[in-house]
Amino acid sequence: AAQDASRAAIREALARPEVRDVATSMHLDLSRAAAAIETLAGADLDQAANAARTVNEQLVGGASTVVISTTTIIIILLLVIILIIAIK
């Protein structure tokens, strides 16, 4: 159940337009990252889920005028990088 909640948090973060925009600007393939979610376990899953929850909390509200802070961008990139590394 905890792993399912962690994976759901990651999926939610990856579905956010802000995350998609940052990933696209960095030429990162979110479809590969999303596919890797099911393969994550243990510390990798925990680390990715924690980053995803932080992103989700910071971007809650969905206002299109939200200014994404540098910290949020770094956390988004961390999440995507963790997922891409997990694929390999």
Image: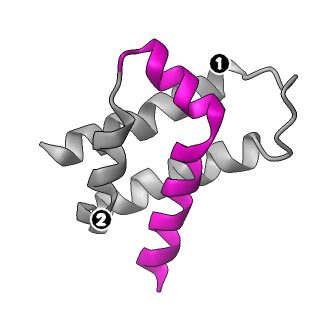
- SS category of the residue bearing label 2: helix
> Answer yes or no: do the residues labelled 2 and 1 have beta carbons within 8 Å?
no
Q: Say what amino acid the circle numbered 1 marks.
A: Thr
Residue drawn at x 29%, y 68% is: 42
- SS category of the residue bearing label 1: helix
Q: Which of pointers 2 and 1 indicates the residue nearer the eye?
A: 2
Bin the neighbour count of mark 1 within 10 Å (Cα to Cα): few under 14, some 14-19, many 20 and up.
few
**Quadrant assignment for the C terminus:** top left
- Residue labelled with disc 1: 70
How many marks do you count on the picture? 2
Residue drawn at x 31%, y 61% is: 43
Q: CA distance from mark 2 to mark 1?
A: 28 Å
**Image-based side of 55 in relation to 80, left or right:** right
Q: Is residue 28 above or below residue 63?
A: above
Q: Quadrant of residue 30?
A: top left
Which of these two is toward me, 83 or 18?
A: 18
Location of residue 77 in the rendering, given as x and y in whole percent from the top left corner:
46, 28
Q: Earlier in the sequence, mark 2 or mark 1?
A: 2
Q: Is residue 38 above or below residue 16?
A: below
Q: Main secondary structure of the magenta part?
A: helix
Question: Residue 3: which disc?
Answer: none
| 17 in magenta | yes
Q: Is residue 76 above or below residue 28?
A: below
The magenta segment: 1-27
Residue drawn at x 26%, y 38% is: 84
Which of these two is toward me, 74 or 25?
A: 25
